[in-house]
Every structure is written in structure tokens, then in C-alpha cells.
Amino acid sequence: MASEQDLRRILGRIDGRGYRAYGDIRGGFDFGPARLFVDHVQGDPFAAPSKLRVRISQREAKLPTDLFATPVRRRALADHLARRVRGAIEERSPAHRGSGKSGLISIDAGGQQVLERTAVRLQTDWVEMRVEVGLPAAGRRVRGREAIQILCDELPEIATRSLTWQALEKDELFRFVESVENQEHLRAQLATRGLVAFVGDGAILPRESGASDRPLQRASAVPFRSPDSLRVCLELANPVAGPHGESREITGMGIREGVTLIVGGGYHGKSTILRALERAVYPHVPGDGRESVVSREDLVKIRAEDGRRVAAVDISGFIGQLPQHRSTRSFCSEDASGSTSQAANIAEAIEVGARGLLLDEDTSATNFMVRDARMQALVGRACEPITPFLERVRELHDDLGVSTVLVMGGCGDYFDVADCVIMLREFRPRDVTQEARGIARQHPTGRIREASSPLVAGRGRIPDAASFDASRGRRDVSIDAHSERAIRYGTEDIELRASEQLLDRSQARAVGFAIHLASQRFMNGKATLAEVLDQLDDFFEREGLDRLDPFGRSDHHPGSFARPRRFEIAAAINRMRSSRLRQES
């Protein structure tokens, strides 16, 4: 391996030459306690930045092995270190040096959720940060002296300040790792306690704005407090400080399996709590306010999605035969309506393992959710193919084991089918289940039951590997994410605006590469979509996210992936207009 002095000499030699001369630095350089790897060099100063790694030996880093002894701790520590790197980068001055992206350094360090990422990798012998760097230029000519400063001086210093035990703030690091470990320990207790979610007393659920996921200032926020009748006590993995000293237990509201309604007036916090639940499938960073809010990993947010593509999905449990004798047992559409898209979203989620649904009436199709007695009288059953969700929500739980948490502010007909009704008033929850049942008895809806057959799970679908072509032009694999809910896969754009639990651009990028990997290794013409996703999950557990790097090419940096759930991978497959799926026989 070349040395630091070799790198300095190369950069001095190419100073002032054309930008492509930077290609001479591709490779590895030994800095003693640290090693620099230049994996990919950008073609010009305006192109996507170059991709580099800095690795520090554990002899120098001295990170305690017990801090990454388990998968949960490893994920938390790596996430914290990536945030440390980002902080050190932000302290640089000046950041921009020359034309285009010259001098810019970045790392994929994430937001309020703690995700498994590839930005920092931990091994027994070393720790490594993966960064992107805009190699400095004047016009399109190399600025070698500035490059020496960035690559030989600043990057090793950033790595030393961010990845070595001596430089870290120990108390902050331990709080971070133990907080994530506590959240995952709480999540592990939900299923055995018959819960789909838990909201801890004292949690801060409101966000500072509709465009921000950061917490509302505590002076303005109402801390959550569970109704006494719904309060449960769960165990923590690590003690936390409280008003009466340290405790290994936490109290809060348990949302039980079954059908739960969240009701109340507008702007009183209904959607706020649902949004907290949908994001609590991941742990949150300390200080977020939602560290004591956890949901089961198999909860999926469902909404109507006009215009989406649907391929061979059995929606007959919700939508009967359509006009012109069009069957819905293998429903296909390039432009689904609100009701058919919502029915497909539910069926697809259950197909790949969802055991809980989160719905908000504000983002649901009205005719899919309910038909009241007056509409039934005017539009008879013979003219209406839709069996409303109201008719099926109990069967979903009782027959298929799928729970529902539903925000409802405008239709009391759901009182008849709910196990629990929680009312939000000025962000304070009340258990009004008995009151709602009394109202239901006193004010019968007069509805006629419209479900003519029991609800059954649809058949699995088999994806055709040949329909997932990731090539574009001369590139065999061309995949990227434009945003957290927009993927470019080959020549196709995949729109995931309705996948509200996809939170990060690096997750979306990983979704695209996961689809490609699955098409190459796991789609064999026999495996159902659920079985393909099972194999993907097993692959991630065994091999890690780095293996999403297609074919191990050195020009594709593995530092910008965050692990997605199986449900978001399935959502992308289902929305690809080029994908082909068929029901198993």
C-alpha cells in the first residue's frame, strides 16, 4: 500500500493539471494509525463527489468491545459515530474551496431515527468512516495544495476526533447506545404483552412544524400521559433517571391488539399520535421526545393512493365484481382509484407479513371506509361493489390476526366494532370506550351489513425476475434515489409518496438495490414475494448492507445505504410499472 507521502507527492505533481488527473490517487494510502481509501474519483468538479473511506485500527481507536457486542448496540454506536463525524465536518472553515463541489465533505448520518447504516462500519480490528469529498478545482484544473490539506490533514483529523475513544464524550455516547437498547427492549415486549404499540408517560409527540421532524420545544408541548385504564408498565434494559431516582421500569399507554379508534376534534392531536406510532417502528435519538414510543415492526401505514399501479392483487374481500363483469380476485390497474388503491395497499401489506394497520380518515377514501344507512337506501347493494372497511376491520383481527389503529373524527359507526376508543382533547388522551359503546346502543346506525362472504387472505404472488431490469444505456446497473420516496431504477421512476414509513433517502436507495439483488438471487419463478423478502431479510442479517454494493465494484461506494423494512421494498416492487407478478396456483 502507498504511503501518505506518496499521496502528497501525487497531489503536488498533478497540481494545475486537468481535473481527470485526480484519477491518479485512486487506491489506498497508509497514514500509520489511519488508512485512506479513494474508491471513486469524480469526473469533474460539478459531478457527484468522490467517495472515500478512512479506517482507524482498533489499537488506535480503543473502542470498548462491549459497546458493539450485540447487533442493537453495534447499530447504535455506528449511528452515533456517524453523527460525530458530521459534527466535525460542520466545524470546518471554510468548507467550499473552488469551483463546483470543491472542498465539500459529507457523511450519511441520518435524522431523528436510528437506522442501520453503512456510513460507519465497526469491526473487531478497525472502525471506518465512509465520506464523500468534492476534490478541489480552479475551473476544471486540479488544486493540489488544497487537496493535500483536505485528504492528508483534515480527513485524518476528523476521523481521530470522531472515532477514537480518547476524543469521544463518553457519557453522551453511553446515553445514546443505552437509549436505543432500551427502545428495542421495549419493542421486544409488545407481542408477548398483546400490544401493538406503547406510548410512554412524559413523551413529547408534537413536532416543531409540519416540515420538521424535530420536537416541539417542551415549554410549548403537552407531555403525554396515559389514561389510568390503559396504563401498563414495561421493563427497561438499562436504568434511566427519574424524579425518584433511577428506574428499570417505565409506564405509559399500551395500545392492545384488536381495533383501536383514536377520536377527537380537529387539531387536538389525533394525527400527531398516529404519526408518532408510524415512525416508532424505528428507535429515536435521545432528546427527540419519542424515545419511549415504540411500535411493533410489522405495523404498516395505509392510505388511499389515486393513480397507483396495481398488479394481480386479490382485493375481492373489499371490492366485489366491477362493472362489465371485471373480476377483482386478480385485480390489475395502471390507474387505480382511491378505494381500489386502498384495498390493494391493505392486501399487499398483509401478503408480506403486516400484523397491524395504521389508518387516518383524512388520507383514506371515504367510500372505502363506510357507507351509512341513507346512502345504502339510495344506492342499493346490487349497484355498489365496495364492502366498506367498517365491515371487515373486525374480521381482519379475529380471522387473520391483523390489528388496526384508526384515526376517526367524522364517523361514529366504528364505535360498533372497536375494542378501545381513545379520545384526544388538547393532546391529552382519555379512554372513552364505555361511553362510545353506550352511544352506539342509544343511537343505532340503521346500517345493513353488506359483507356477503367471509374475509380470507389472498393468494401469494410470484415476481418475474426478468421484469426488474436495472440497466440504463451502457450501465448494467443504474439505481439511485431522488428523495426519500422517489427511486430511479434503470429507466423507470418509482413513486413512493404514499409510503410514509420510508423516512430517509439512503433507505430509498437501499430499496432500489435490494430489488436488484432479489431479482438476481432470489426470484426464481417459484418463490412468492413474501418468500423473496424472507430471503432478503436473512441476507441482510448474515451479510450486512455493504453487500448491496452490486458485484463489489470499487467505483460504487457502500457508504450511503440505510436498511429498509420488507414492507417498503414490497411497496416499491408493487408500484413499478414494468414489474410482472402472477398469483401462485
Image (cartoon, rainbow, N blue to C red):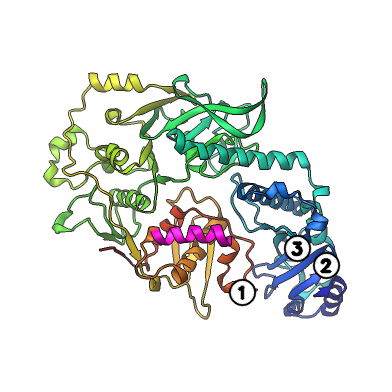
Secondary element under disc 1, as helix, strand or loop, is: loop
The amino acid at mark 3 is Val
Q: Position of residue 280 (x, y in %)?
A: 52, 41
Instruction: Residue 94: tell me if it is visible.
Output: no
557 with respect to 495 (left or right): right
Q: Residue at x 28, y 19 (%)?
A: 438
Distance of mark 2 from mark 1, alpha carbons?
Answer: 28 Å
Instruction: Answer whether residue 193 is magenta in the image.
Output: no
Dominant SS type (magenta): helix
Instruction: Residue 407: tell me if it is visible.
Output: yes
How many residues crowd around disc 3 within 10 Å: few (fewer than 14), some, or many (20 or more)? many
Callout 3 touching callout 2 (CB < 8 Å): no
Q: Badge 1 is on which residue?
A: 553
The quarter of the picture where residue 363 lies is: top left
Secondary element under disc 2, as helix, strand or loop, is: helix
Distance of mark 3 from mark 1, alpha carbons?
Answer: 18 Å
Mark 2 or mark 1: name the one nearer the start of the chain.
2
Q: Position of residue 164 (x, y in %)?
A: 80, 52
Mark 3 or mark 1: name the one nearer the start of the chain.
3
Q: Badge 3 is on which residue?
A: 54
Residue 245 vertical placement versus 284 (above, below): above
Q: Quadrant of the N terminus?
A: bottom right
Q: Badge 2 is on which residue?
A: 146
Q: Position of residue 216 (x, y in %)?
A: 60, 34
The amino acid at mark 1 is Arg
How many residues crowd around disc 1 within 10 Å: few (fewer than 14), some, or many (20 or more)? few
Mark 3 or mark 2: name the one nearer the start of the chain.
3
Depth check, front residue: 398 or 285: 398
